[in-house]
Image (spheres, grey):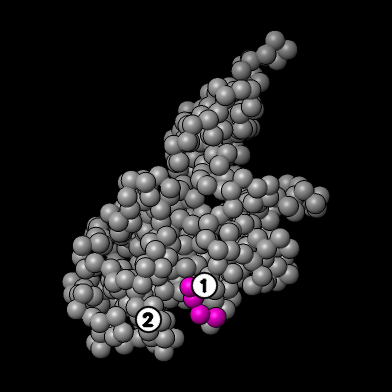
């Protein structure tokens, strides 16, 4: 059974593969050998700033061949080495192929937590109208705790509740709270602690926002890393189903099976483009879908911003604060597309998307208080554009049109 390496001094804490901070990373050790499973399999202690957590279970899903290469259990004097090792290893192999009983949380907890009274929603009020916020809170079933933490519920495509991610935000800056006890937690952890019925809860995460795939089956999909980013971008570009992986390694084949026959665009955080590009290739090899990746943030971010985990939400808020027009779209956005089979029912939509991309709007030719007449917007979006002209440039910069 894998376990986190106990703290026995600075030598047992390592460099985080995500944020690159020294002595913050705790490795998972193989329960049979007490050796690290892999240099990337572990948890960053900077849960607020970084949040990197790559579990052994996910590692062996991503790299099944590694599971067969794990060392056998060490023999002991009181136990015959051959028979005990052979039996134990045989049981592990059977367990790895056995169906997994996914743990679910009753919907009543989602209903009880439903609230606008979180610091995160308070932050959104500084940039978005009340109507947009009400819609996004309802769409994503956002909840709130008594301490005004936001609950990002993970609801799968069948409407089942996998878990809820509890996070604290600064209501003024929108940044996650640092170095405070309870600043990040999980609903299933709280239930396990307070309710013996959940002692053996088997967590199997899904994409945040996955339930929208069933509610809006005709919408294309955009995937970002952070839940906060999915919420913010969904208010700017509502014609996409915005999903979040929850962490850098949250983009994987197993969770992406619900994306079969869909059009998908990935928006990785700054510094994560190459890793997600490789993940994209793995997904394309296993799942029938059309998937592309944007390097918008990778190109736009400075070295300092990359080190700080700059993402699409930061980019959007930055533009809204400045209220300035963005550079020409083609100077900022490059979506790499590789050929994959296209679902028949989406061919028309793909053709239209290619036409839009081949004729990007030159936002420098538009006045701040005008939108291009050939692309009318809904009244609510037009109202937002009139208040924040940067929104028009932002939409054009992502080369998207409202459906």
* Residue 375 percent location from the top left of the image: 28, 85
355 or 12: which is nearer to us? 12
Q: Main secondary structure of the magenta part?
A: loop
| Residue tagged 2 | 385
Count of residue discs: 2
Q: Is residue 276 visible?
A: no
| Discs 2/1, front | 1
Q: Is residue 22 visible?
A: yes
As measured in the structure, the alpha-carbon distance from the residue carrying label 2 to the one carrying label 1 is 15 Å
Q: Quadrant of the N terminus?
A: top right
Circle 1 — which element? loop
Q: Is residue 167 left or right of residue 394?
A: right
Who is closer to the viewer here, 133 or 202? 133
At 57% from the left and 78% from the top, the residue drawn is 134
From the top left corner, tell me how far across and down residue 385 is, in percent.
Answer: 37, 81
- Give the camera-side residue of 141 and 278: 141
| Vertical comparison of 91 with 392: above or below | above
């Amino acid at each position: 059974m894998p376990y986190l390496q106990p703290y026995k001094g600075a030598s047992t804490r390592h460099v985080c593969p995500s944020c690159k901070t020294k002595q913050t990373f705790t490795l998972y050790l193989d329960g049979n050998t007490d050796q690290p499973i892999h240099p990337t399999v572990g948890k960053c202690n900077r849960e607020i700033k970084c949040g990197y957590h790559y579990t052994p279970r996910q590692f062996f899903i991503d790299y099944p061949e590694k599971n067969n290469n794990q060392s056998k259990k060490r023999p002991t004097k009181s136990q015959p080495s051959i028979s005990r090792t052979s039996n134990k290893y045989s049981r592990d192999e059977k367990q790895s192929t056995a169906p997994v009983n996914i743990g679910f949380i009753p919907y009543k907890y989602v209903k009880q937590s439903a609230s606008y009274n979180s610091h995160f929603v308070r932050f959104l009020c500084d940039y978005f109208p009340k109507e947009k916020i009400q819609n996004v809170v309802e769409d994503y079933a956002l909840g709130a705790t008594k301490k005004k933490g936001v609950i990002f519920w993970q609801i799968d495509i069948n409407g089942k509740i996998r878990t809820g991610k509890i996070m604290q935000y600064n209501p003024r800056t929108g940044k996650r709270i640092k170095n405070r006890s309870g600043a990040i937690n999980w609903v299933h952890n709280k239930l396990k602690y307070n309710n013996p019925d959940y002692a053996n809860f088997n967590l199997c995460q899904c994409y945040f926002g996955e339930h929208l795939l069933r509610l809006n089956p005709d919408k294309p999909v955009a995937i970002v890393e952070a839940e906060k980013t999915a919420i913010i971008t969904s208010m700017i570009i509502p014609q996409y189903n915005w999903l979040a992986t929850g962490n850098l390694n949250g983009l994987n084949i197993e969770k992406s099976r619900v994306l079969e026959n869909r059009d998908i665009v990935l928006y990785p955080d700054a510094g994560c483009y190459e890793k997600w590009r490789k993940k994209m290739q793995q997904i394309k090899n296993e799942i029938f879908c059309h998937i592309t990746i944007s390097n918008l943030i990778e190109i736009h971010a400075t070295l300092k911003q990359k080190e700080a985990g700059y993402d699409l939400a930061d980019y959007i808020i930055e533009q809204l604060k400045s209220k300035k027009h963005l550079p020409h779209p083609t100077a900022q956005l490059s979506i790499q597309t590789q050929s994959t089979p296209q679902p028949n029912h989406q061919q028309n939509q793909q053709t239209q998307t290619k036409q839009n991309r081949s004729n990007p709007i030159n936002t420098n030719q538009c006045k701040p208080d005008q939108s291009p007449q050939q692309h009318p917007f809904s009244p609510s979006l037009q109202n937002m554009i009139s208040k924040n002209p940067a929104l028009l440039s932002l939409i054009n910069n992502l080369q998207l049109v409202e459906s």
